[in-house]
Amino acid sequence: MDMRSRFLVFVLPLLACGQATAMGLPSLDASGIAPAVVSAMSSAQTVFVSANDGAAAKSMISRLGDEAIRTISNSGLDEASKKQTFRRLLTQNFDMATIGRFAMGKYWRQATPQQQAEYTRLYEKMIVDVYTARFNKYSGQTFEVTDTRVDESGDIVVSSNVVSSGSTPVSVDWRVRPKGGGYRIIDVMVEGVSMAVTQRNDFAGVIQQGGGTVDALLDYLKKGGTSDVKK
Amino acid sequence: MPAKYSFARMFSVAALVGLLSVPLAGCAMNPKPGMDQDETAISDPLEPVNRVTFAFNEMLDAVLFTPLTSIYHNVVPEVARNAVHNVVDNLKSPVYMANELLQGNVKDAGVVARRFATNTVLGIGGIVDVAAKQGVKYQPEDFGQTLATWGVDSGPYIVWPILGPSSLRDSVGFAADIAMDPLYWYAQNTDRDGINQGRAAATFIDTKDRTLDVMQDLRRNSGDMYKALQSVYVQRRKALVNDLEPGKQSLPEIE
């Protein structure tokens, strides 16, 4: 089965059971089905990913890993300029807007445009802080890209191993999406655990524990979002 | 104690496990997808009780287990810590093998057997993981995963005191793995309780040591540690059931 028919097989039953809005597609009445299927087909076109894409995504992840390790091990750089480089690497390579929206889940649509804008800004800051702290824990691990595959979602999954001496390698999968002629990371999966999903479940907990409002999440992120913030 | 008695006991535990597994097949972790259903949401009917147990466990970790684990990590040299890990892992080989066979993986059962023989003999009673050094990779199978491959759903998420995150299915699996462990019954039936206690303590401290960094990272970087840990547990178990094979499980839909 080629990509397009696989996509349609996947999408049509969902349209039929009224999940169109949940998928971000326009909601349908009977007369709207035909145009929607056409638009589903044309968006299915974009999921064709060539072997070229795989190779390009792979070299993007290799470069990112190499540059991150080079930055950490560069003793000539002070903390501030290291953080500056990490910020550039992260914002250039991660699709922060998409990850952030996913992490907020159903609450994204409940947020006002102002809340969405503030959230996006705070989320990006948090990711930079979290990953800078993680990078700074670096202690000589090596990073090697092992494999790439095209997922049925149309995204490219670049597999890598982070190897520290004396312990078993940790598998890290990078989910990469072709975007605007380039590629952006939309999820990192460590030993089968998606960071985006973990964050989404965590954020839902913050909101539910904080009284069910988006402001609870914004308050948490305003406090930095990277230390033990408990209610 | 006569051998007949031990067999009767083993049988009764196995029967109990079997009985418990049947109703499990009926309950699903996630409700049927409907309007506005979040595919990543984890249904958690026991959440109020679980949160209390979780808070208790976090308190125990903070005042007792994390300091103990740090002492263990800093005082015991890496070679010895690896030896502890390898020995407790090697002793579980019969359980791994039984689960491979119950899942119909004859080839992997053979891998376990070879690994057990190599590590017990060349690795001096399992102290050294010689098989790993020879390039034999092995991902342990437990009875929770076996039940999953038989189509049993995970059932509700459960946080146990001290032991931490589990599910109904994985709790049954945990008990079944003990019930099918020959060394456990040997120690029981010969009144060598010290063997089981020592083994449980070694397994516990080794697990705490190996998960400490991840737990601390999660505590620092989560707003609701209860939900974050639950998410990691559920995802990790799902990945293990799929044997971490790329493409075997569909990725979350990220719009």
Image (tube, coloured by chain):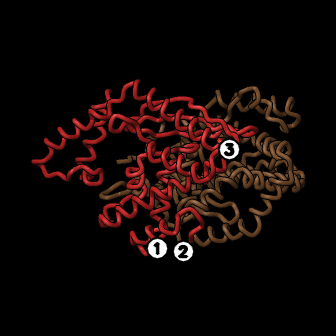
Chain colours: A red, B brown
- Could you tell whether B97 is left or right of A230 in the image? right
**Location of residue A65 (image quadrant):** top right
Q: Which residue is mark 3?
A: A75
Q: Chain of mark 3?
A: A
Q: Residue at x 60, y 72 (%)?
A: B52
Q: Residue at x 41, y 46 (%)?
A: A95
Q: Is residue A130 something one can see in this rendering?
A: yes
Verify CB contact (< 8 Å) between mark 1 and mark 2. yes
Q: Earlier in the sequence, mark 1 or mark 3?
A: 3
Residue A45, label in figure: none
Q: Which residue is mark 1?
A: A210
Q: Which residue is mark 2?
A: A231
Q: Residue at x 51, y 53 (%)?
A: A128
Give percent across and percent down for residue B227. 53, 62
Give percent across and percent down for residue B204. 76, 55
Q: Quadrant of the N terminus of chain A?
A: top left
Gap between marks 3 and 2 measured at Cα: 39 Å
Q: Secondary structure at mark 2?
A: loop
